[in-house]
Every structure is written in C-alpha cells, then in structure tokens.
Amino acid sequence: MPEELLMLIRGLIFDINGTLTDIHTNEWHEDIYRILANLLSYQGIALGPHEVKDAYFQIMKEQRAASNERYPEFDAVGIFREIMTRHATEFTRRLPPEKLEQLPLFLAETYRAASRFQLQLYNGVAETVRQLRLNYHLAIISDGQSAYAVPELNAVGLFDTFDPVIISGDLGYRKPDPRLFENALTRMQMAPSEVLYVCNDMYRDVYGAQKAGIKTIFFRSNQGQQEKEDVQPDYIIYHFPELLHAVRFFEKQ
C-alpha cells in the first residue's frame, strides 16, 4: 500500500464505557446512600440515606439548570463539595484543611465504587489497542467524570494508552456537543479526515462526531443507543478485534 494512503488515518479516538469497557452501575441502589450517609457522619454531617440521595440529585439538577450549555454535564465532585458546604457542622469545620479539601473527591469515588457492579474490558480490547498503538495516536472522548474515568482506565490496564483523555465532566458539556471532538483534534494536531472515532452510542457518539466531520466506527455492544433516525455510522463492528479490519478499510479509501 502506498505510503501516502497509510498516512490518511493518523489517529483513533475512543469512547470508554460500552466501547472499551463493559461496565454495569446502578445509581439507584439504596446501599450507595447508606454508605455515603455513614461516611458523612464521620465528618460531622448527620444525613440519612434518603436525604443524601435527595441532596445528590437535587444539586445535580441545580448544576444543569444553571448551565447555559445545550448539553450540560454535571460535576460529581462539585455535588459533594456543595453537600458538605450546606450541611457542615462545627465538627466538620474543625477537620484538618487538607482533609476538607480531599473529601469531595473521596466521596465521589466512594459513590462510584458503591454503585459499580462490573468493570471489565470487552473481549479483544487489550490486544487490539496494543496493536493499534504501534501505528496510531490514540485518544479518549467520553461523557462522565474524571474522578471515575481515569481510575477505571487504570483498573483495566489502559491508563497510559491514550493522550489526550477528554472527559465531559471537566468541561461542563457532554456529547453530542462537537466541541469535545474539536478539542481532541486540536490537542492531537490532526484534521477530522485523519481521525476515526470508535464508539457505541448512535446519538451522542456517531451524531456528535459526524457533526465535527469525523468518520465513525460503531461498536454494536450491549450498551448505548443503537438507533437514531437519520444517523448512520461509517462502519459497524460486532466484535472488538474487527476494528483492525475497519481501520484498514478506511486506509484504502
């Protein structure tokens, strides 16, 4: 294959959950809020499990309502910082400053840990990504929170694989906002035609990437919106290792 054709595709961007990782969470499980209520009690904050749950979702709603974004994203660490601010007692305020600074992040991590019931790579992800990394610049664009996404990438052995790692919670807006994709292209120093987006949601992922001029490879996994009117991916795979064939397909275009 001529060298100029090989250079057409220089990078791949991946979604995380439902694309790289097969993850199952349940944010409505009552044990989450019992654990958080107990943990908050050690910080001098007396809230029952249902009060913690109500506060969490109420502040999330307030964050989104206060946003001017079309697709607003919440800030989980900010939610717990606000819970602590609103319900702090004298005992809370006397905690060491370094502990008070770290507690919102720790509470967000605890929330995710308590709500997570499964986290594993889909079959073939590790080897496929390893092969792609030899020849392509790999990056991440994912909706979610850095407090969760980065440690979970580390937990499945992919922490040092992607650069940049762009998480919607850090920006205040989520897919399908094309700015997420434009951000990645800028940081990768690539044009839309040089990049493929590997994803699993027809609306947030495929629609969003195509608005930014990026071709998409849709992984039909067990997660994500599988259909969207008037939206079609550029390529579909049913097993992750098929991604290698998909990339070769685009190189020949």
Image (cartoon, helix red, strand yellow):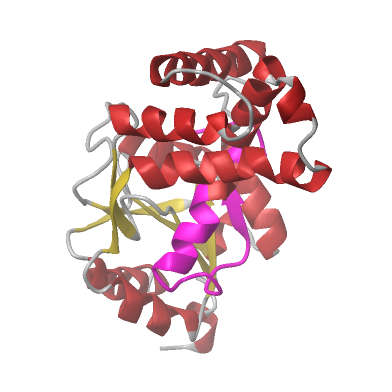
Q: Quadrant of the C terminus?
A: bottom left
Q: Give the magenta-colored segment's residue range.
A: 148-176
Closer to us: 27 or 14? 27
**Residue at 53% in and 14% down:** 61
The residue lying at 47 percent from left, 88 percent from top is 2
Q: Quadrant of the N terminus?
A: bottom left
Q: Is residue 9 left or right of residue 188?
A: left
**Which x, y percent locates residue 103?**
65, 41
Q: Is residue 41 above or below residue 14?
A: above
Q: Is residue 202 above or below residue 64?
A: below
Q: Position of residue 31 (x, y in %)?
A: 31, 33
The one nearer the camera, 164 or 105, is 105
Image coordinates of residue 236 in percent, x first then y, are: 24, 55
Q: Quadrant of residue 251?
A: bottom left
Q: Is residue 151 magenta?
A: yes
Give the quadrant of residue 100. Answer: top right
How many marks the image carries: the answer is 0
Q: Is residue 19 shown to the viewer in this render? A: yes
Q: Position of residue 209 (x, y in %)?
A: 48, 44
Is residue 34 within the magenta segment?
no
Query: Where 2 falls versus 136 (above or below)?
Result: below
